[in-house]
Image: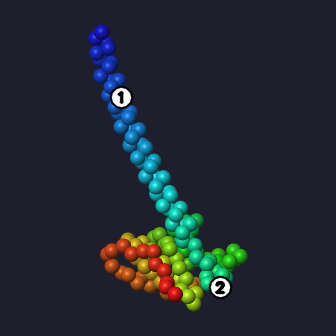
């Protein structure tokens, strides 16, 4: 009888601890799933064709973080345009296809940048402490 009085509280503690750990593990897994889905949505929603359908500008994390790439429509001449330590996302061609506008957090928060279609002359257009994103050129 004395043994049961000692064992029962210990079992209750293990049961409560096990449920709490399972709940925490599930929350961590749910958060990781959400982050993975969000990253996948960024990549899938960040592909744009040029108006003449000659080139595609898109996002890929093939080098470890989201970068902006450009290639010909048939897959030739692949080039990484941004090569930054930040996440570069949501590229969009200008109407004349000479410029690309995009979002990047390379300076610590999300800002809107513009660059030439070859990746040169990257300029921060919204240099401020607020987060800015999802840019596009209007017709």
Q: Is residue 65 above or below residue 124?
A: above
Residue 133 image label: none
Residue matched to label 2: 52
Q: Is residue 91 above or below residue 97?
A: above
Tell whether 14 sits left or right of 120.
left
Q: Earlier in the sequence, mark 2 or mark 1?
A: 1
Q: For the residue labelled by badge 2, is the local secondary structure a helix, a strand or a loop? A: loop
Q: Quadrant of residue 13?
A: top left
Q: CA distance from mark 2 to mark 1?
A: 65 Å
Q: Nearer the viewer, mark 2 or mark 1?
A: 2
Query: What colour scheme has been applied to the protein in the rendered image?
Result: rainbow
Q: In the image, what residue occupies the spot 32% across and 75% down?
A: 129
Provide residue 10's location: percent of width, then percent of height.
32, 23
Q: Is residue 113 above or below residue 131?
A: below
User: Label 1 neighbourhood size at 10 Å, few (<14), some (14-19), many (20+)?
Assistant: few
Q: Is residue 107 visible?
A: no
Residue matched to label 1: 14
Query: Total label count?
Result: 2
Q: In the image, what residue occupies the spot 42% across and 48% down?
A: 28
Q: Quadrant of residue 117?
A: bottom right
Q: In the image, what residue occupies the spot 61% across and 82% down?
A: 50
Q: Is residue 92 visible?
A: yes
Provide residue 115's location: percent of width, then percent of height.
50, 84
User: Label 2 neighbourhood size at 10 Å, few (<14), some (14-19), many (20+)?
Assistant: few
Provide residue 92's location: percent of width, then percent of height.
53, 79
């Amino acid at each position: 009888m004395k043994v049961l009085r000692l064992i029962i509280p210990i079992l209750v503690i293990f049961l409560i601890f096990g449920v709490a750990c399972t709940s925490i593990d599930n929350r961590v897994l749910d958060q990781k799933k959400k982050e993975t889905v969000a990253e996948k949505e960024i990549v899938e929603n960040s592909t744009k064709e040029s108006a003449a359908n000659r080139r595609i500008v898109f996002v890929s994390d093939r080098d470890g973080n989201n970068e902006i790439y450009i290639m010909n429509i048939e897959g030739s001449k692949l080039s990484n345009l941004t090569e930054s330590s930040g996440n570069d996302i949501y590229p969009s061609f200008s109407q004349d296809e000479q410029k690309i506008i995009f979002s990047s957090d390379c300076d610590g928060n999300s800002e809107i940048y513009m660059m030439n279609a070859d990746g040169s002359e990257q300029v921060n257009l919204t240099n401020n402490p607020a987060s800015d994103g999802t840019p596009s050129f209007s017709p």
